[in-house]
Image (cartoon, helix red, strand yellow):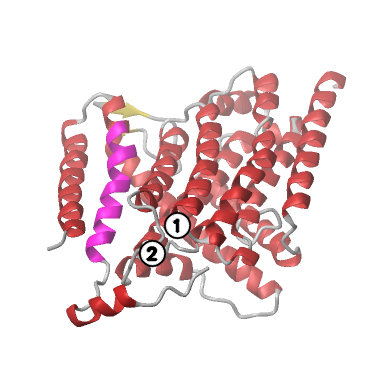
Amino acid sequence: MNKLMVTSYSLLIISIILILYALIFSPTDWIVYGIAIVFIPIFILSLGLITMAKAKKEEEEERKEEPFIGY
Amino acid sequence: MINISYNSFLVIDTMNLMANVLINVVIAFLLGSLLLGLHRKIMARIQLRPGPPVIQHLLHSLKFFFKETSFPKTASMPFYVSITCLYCAIWILAVIIGPVTYGTLLIIFAIYAVYKIVEHNAGSSSGSPYGKLSCVRAVFSAAAEIPLFAVLAIIFLQTGTINIGDIVTYQAVHGPLIFSIPLAALVFFILILSKSPYSPFSITKGKDIISGFETEHFGVLRGYMMLSESIAWYVLLWVFLTVFFGPLSINGYLIGMVSITAITALINATTPILNPNHSVMSQITLAIVGIGGSLLLMFIV
């Protein structure tokens, strides 16, 4: 598992725990707002990074070696 | 802790605050996506094309979450990824300030200022020349769109408050603001128009620069940005309807949102994108006319 996946899984777990904490324990309003503003976006992003399709092992090199056609 | 909120879009009077936020974010995403899909459909029909189904924007947003994503070599990481997170965060804040708490319009103003920074930084962090051009245009267009927000001053002068909840209460007594300060409503509508897709004023996403600041954000990041766009569109329409049409029922909101989406689609389908100078000057002119006219009307009437 590469660094991106480890980070994504960690952030997903942290955000789920904090959102559930706010849902179940109903802390002070400003804590709920903080969790909502910071951790809902992180939850969606980390979920997206986990669910996105990854290049196959044999294709990985192809992706990196693709000539830079830019600008 | 139980949160007592106003009669929100979904009737939630007493509810867990986090649940309230989550439900409103999901509603904003789903309804915003469908409205943007409708916008595209109406534009297509006006241009005599069949157009994609109304649900297409929603499907695209979800589809991109499963697409293979690679990050450009030229992108400045992790800024390139984190800016999409900021994009989503500001619109979730807007949902909290709007439908959840009926808070102050000044924070909505601040969110639009930060949105300009997001456009700017998403463009510059990608390393693409199209993104960079869009980032320059974001600064340029901020000079035009921010004055449109001077409409807040008119609302304050008329109602004596900047709080959405108090403005709704004021309208329940004195009638909708659209009748007392119509030019301010027009200026706000121009702001909505400038944020709609394929707008004559949307110079940051003009097709002459491919997709502007979103050009190099593809795959999951594009899906994530589309999700934020949907929430943004919903919030903008919600703020307009709430501030100028007063307390509305769910049907009132739905009819209002669909109507404004249809009107912007009609305008966008029949109007070419303006060049950056014309876009900025048109908006500034409209802002001056709208705000000056409103002040004049307030002093005369």
Report which residue position mark 2 lands on.
Answer: B72
Rendered location of residue B191, percent (x, y): 66, 44
* Residue A44 painted magenta: yes
Q: Is residue B100 left or right of residue B51?
A: left
Discs 2 and 1 lie in a common subunit: yes
**Label 2 neighbour load within 10 Å: few <14, some 14-19, many 20+:** some
Q: Callout 2: residue from which chain? A: B
Q: Main secondary structure of the magenta part?
A: helix
Q: Callout 1: residue from which chain? A: B
Q: Nearer the viewer, residue A44 or A11?
A: A11
Residue depicted at 50% across the width and 30% down the height: B107
Residue depicted at 16% across the width and 31% down the height: A25
Q: Are marks 2 and 1 in contact (CB under 8 Å)?
A: yes
Q: Secondary structure beneath disc 2?
A: loop
Rendered location of residue B42, percent (x, y): 63, 68
Q: Nearer the viewer, residue B200 or B189?
A: B200
Rendered location of residue B120, percent (x, y): 53, 47
Give the number of the disc on residue B231.
none
Residue depicted at 47% across the width and 36% down the height: B98
CA distance for labels 2 and 1: 7 Å
Give the number of the disc on residue B126.
1
Q: Amino acid at mark 1?
A: Ser
Q: Is residue A10 left or right of residue A28?
A: left
* Residue A61 painted magenta: no
B128 relative to A14, above or below: below
Q: Which residues are magenta?
A: A34-51
Q: Secondary structure beneath disc 1?
A: helix
Quadrant (top left/top right/bottom left/bottom right) for the N terminus of chain B: top left
Q: Specify the quadrant of the image occupied by residue B149.
A: top right
Quadrant (top left/top right/bottom left/bottom right) for the C terminus of chain B: top right
Q: Is residue B30 visible?
A: no
